[in-house]
Image (cartoon, helix red, strand yellow):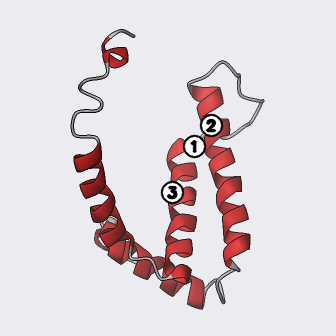
Amino acid sequence: MAEADTHDIGLSRAQAIVDDWIKTVGVRYFSPLTNMAVLTEEVGEVARVMARKYGDQSAKEGERLDLADELADVLWVVLAIANQTGVDLAQAFRNNLDKKNVRDYRRHIDNPKLYNP
């Protein structure tokens, strides 16, 4: 795939790319439950990187701390789960943004805790 094809591709295109890869290179989708376990594992890897880069833990000798790669792994599995369960993530994201703009319109602005770190 050319670099231009992967830069800022959007959620719909990302879902299509993951679907195509899984059906060709990956053979088939894992079960939804397996993908949920894989997602949990990938989120744990993000947590490991965060704890070592931004928290109090130190990295082990030779430990790879690539936050971008770990976040991309999480995104990949989320896209796969969306595909296999029939979720259009682009539409779901738009709906979620609308929900937040209504529900949280003043919630954070009116929260004094956010002004006193």
Query: Closest to the observer: 61 or 67?
Result: 67
Q: For the point 40% across and 78% down, which residue is it? A: 1
- Comes first in the chain, label 1 or label 2: 2
Q: Which residue is mark 3?
A: 72
Residue sitting at the far top: 116
Displayed quadrant of residue 36: bottom right
The label on residue 107 is: none
Residue 27: give x, y in percent of width and height: 66, 89
Task: Reply above or below: 31 against 10.
Answer: below
Looking at the rendered structure, the secondary structure element under dot 3 is helix
Q: Can you identify the residue that label 2 sits on?
A: 49
* Residue at mark 3 to residue at mark 1: CA–CA distance: 10 Å
Identify the amino acid type marked 1. Asp
Give the residue drawn at x 61%, y 85%: 25
Q: Secondary structure at mark 2?
A: helix
Q: Residue furthest right?
A: 61
Residue at the outermost front position = 103
The image shows residue 70 at horizontal and vertical percentages of: 58, 50
Separation of marks 3 and 2 at Cα, in angstroms: 13 Å
52 over 56 or under it: above or below: below
| Tag 3 near tag 2, CB within 8 Å | no
State the residue at coordinates (28%, 70%): 4
Is residue 2 rendered to the left or right of residue 24?
Answer: left
User: For this view, does 44 lie left or right of residue 50?
Assistant: right
Would you say the residues marked 3 and 1 are in contact, meaning their CB atoms lie under 8 Å apart? no
Q: Quick one: label 3, few (<14), some, or many (20+) residues within 10 Å?
A: few
Say the numbered circle drawn on residue 66: 1
